[in-house]
Image (cartoon, rainbow, N blue to C red):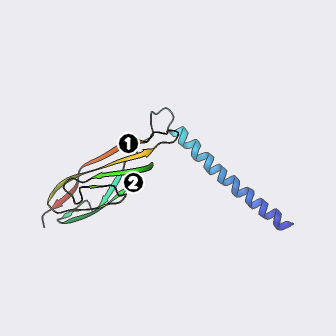
Amino acid sequence: MRRIAIVHDLFGRCFLVLFLIVFLSLSCSTRLFQGRDSWPGPAEFGGHPTSGKAPLEVQFGDLSTALIIQWDWAFPGGTPDKSKEIEPTVIYNKPGEYDVSLTVLYHVPDDSVPRQETELKKKYIEVTSE
């Protein structure tokens, strides 16, 4: 009988902790964005390395914070010059400075229509001669 009481007590405590975590998360999110027209922009990315000698191979990664349902990358001057992958790898064969953009399609809580946003980083990649 004592084991049942201990298990019941542990289950109750775990449930309470889980409930508080979920409740506080939702409460903080709601309070944080009250009075705003929309959630903060979700399109964000990084790449490594961002500079080096040709041919330069760059691994890009999505750092977006929203529920992304589609990625559209543009790498003018790179190979490939476009991608729909989450973490594409691009090779820059010629010296120069290159822009990179990521357009994402994402969902916002309490909104049934997906939204789109683009992040453009001008001269993000710098390639020097061999």
Task: Indicate the position of residue 76 as horizontal and vertical percent values.
Answer: 21, 53
Q: Which residue is found at the position 74% from the left and 56% from the top?
A: 12
- If you read the primary sequence from the N terminus, does the residue marked by circle 1 or circle 2 appear first? 2
Q: Quadrant of residue 58?
A: bottom left
Q: Do the residues bearing badges 1 and 2 touch, measured as CB atoms within 8 Å?
A: no
User: Can residue 65 be seen at all in this image of the molecule?
Assistant: no
> Under tag 2, what secondary structure?
loop
According to the picture, the residue beneath numbered tag 2 turns out to be: 63
Q: Nearer the viewer, mark 1 or mark 2?
A: 1
According to the picture, the residue beneath numbered tag 1 turns out to be: 116
Quarter of the rendering occupied by the C terminus:
bottom left
Task: Indicate the position of residue 121 as horizontal and vertical percent values.
Answer: 27, 49
Q: Which residue is found at the position 77% from the left and 64% from the top?
A: 7
Q: Which residue is found at the position 40% from the left and 43% from the top?
A: 41
| Amino acid of disc 1 | Gln
Disc 1/disc 2 C-alpha distance (Å): 15 Å
User: Can residue 82 be seen at all in this image of the molecule?
Assistant: yes
